Image (spheres, rainbow, N blue to C red):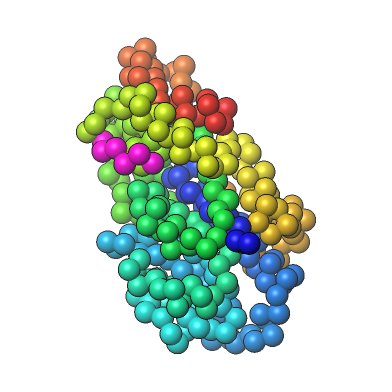
Amino acid sequence: MKRKIPVFYHIPKNAGTYVSDWFMIAFRHYRRTYTDWLKNYSPEKDSIKCIQIIEDGFIIARVLVGDPNYFCDTHCKFINAHSNTKWDIDLKDITNELLNNVFLFGIIIESNGFKQRKAILDLFYNYNLHQFLILRDPFSRAQSIYNYNKSEESKHDYVHGKMISATFKEHILSEQLEDSWLIRELTSIEDVIPLGEIYFNQTKIILDDFKVYGIKDTDKAIQEAFLECYSFDTKQIELKPWDKFTKNESVNKKVKFEELSEEAQKVFTERTCWDNELYKTFAS
């Protein structure tokens, strides 16, 4: 029988960092509670590794694996080791030898990897997948993306400062306003192609294989993923001093939709109509 693993799809500004942090917290809990891996403790090595899959210089996925025999430290073709726990590897260098010598705990598909999700998941054909993602209402998400891009918080990000509008209200009327990101990523439709109902329906079919949650149910999504795959309740985990998680909350003043001009309201509603329909269908 195939073992089931959690697979989270990290949509930008949809609580993805928070969920990713909980993956590691849950994994450390699993190691303490269900394994004897810490018997082989080494200060220079770690039996838990976050393997970052790289393609064309971008992280497309993060794979959490148990490595109690430190196979990765001596046998694998890694690009870089950032620490005892965080390692980079090129997609083409992931082999069956590697996967057969580690314990796969979970997978996070990063935003740069949505279009390559089949190539990524084909590596893990021996597992059943609990795929899930978090949706957020399009207006709240668009404002969060804009504020993040303009803030010092994003200065490490390659997209930092690329939004040219001086205010969010101006941004809505610009060509940089995002147009149904998830639909385009899951159906591989380029930005220059107008969206229509056919792509919305294709996305609905894809998401039928997912558990989809609204952002208000993020903790429920995390809890259900690990109950389903590992039969433990994340709400019962006693957090250790090193168990940190991030809740990104903008300090910028939020603009209400009603405060926009009629033109801006019309533009936003039209540009995000299919995105909004997706949110109402799955997560409102």
Residue lying at the far front of the rendered structure: 1
Q: Quadrant of residue 56?
A: bottom left
> Along the line of sight, which residue is nearer the eye, 118 or 252?
118
Magenta-span inclusion, residue 187:
yes
Quarter location, residue 30? bottom right
Horizontal and vertical percent position of residue 62: 46, 62
Task: Say left or right for 147 vs 267.
Answer: right
> Vertical placement of 26 versus 80: above or below?
above
Q: Position of residue 3 (x, y in %)?
A: 61, 61
State the residue in front, 261 or 266. Answer: 266
The answer to whether one can see residue 17 in this image is yes
The residue range painted magenta reads 186-191
Residue at screen point 45% across, 78% down: 97
| Rendered image quadrant of residue 109 | bottom left
Quarter of the image where the C terminus is located: top right
Where is 234 relative to 72, above or below? above
- Residue furthest left as drawn: 192
Q: How many marks?
A: 0
| In the foreground, 242 or 278 | 278
Specify the quadrant that holds the N terminus: bottom right
218 is within the stretch colored magenta: no
Percent across and percent down for residue 36 are 71, 79
Q: Tell me: residue 24, above or below residue 182.
A: below
- Residue at horizontal 46 percent and vertical 16 percent from the top: 258
Image spot of residue 126 (x, y percent): 52, 63
| Majority SS type along the magenta span | loop
User: Is residue 251 something that shows in the picture?
Assistant: no
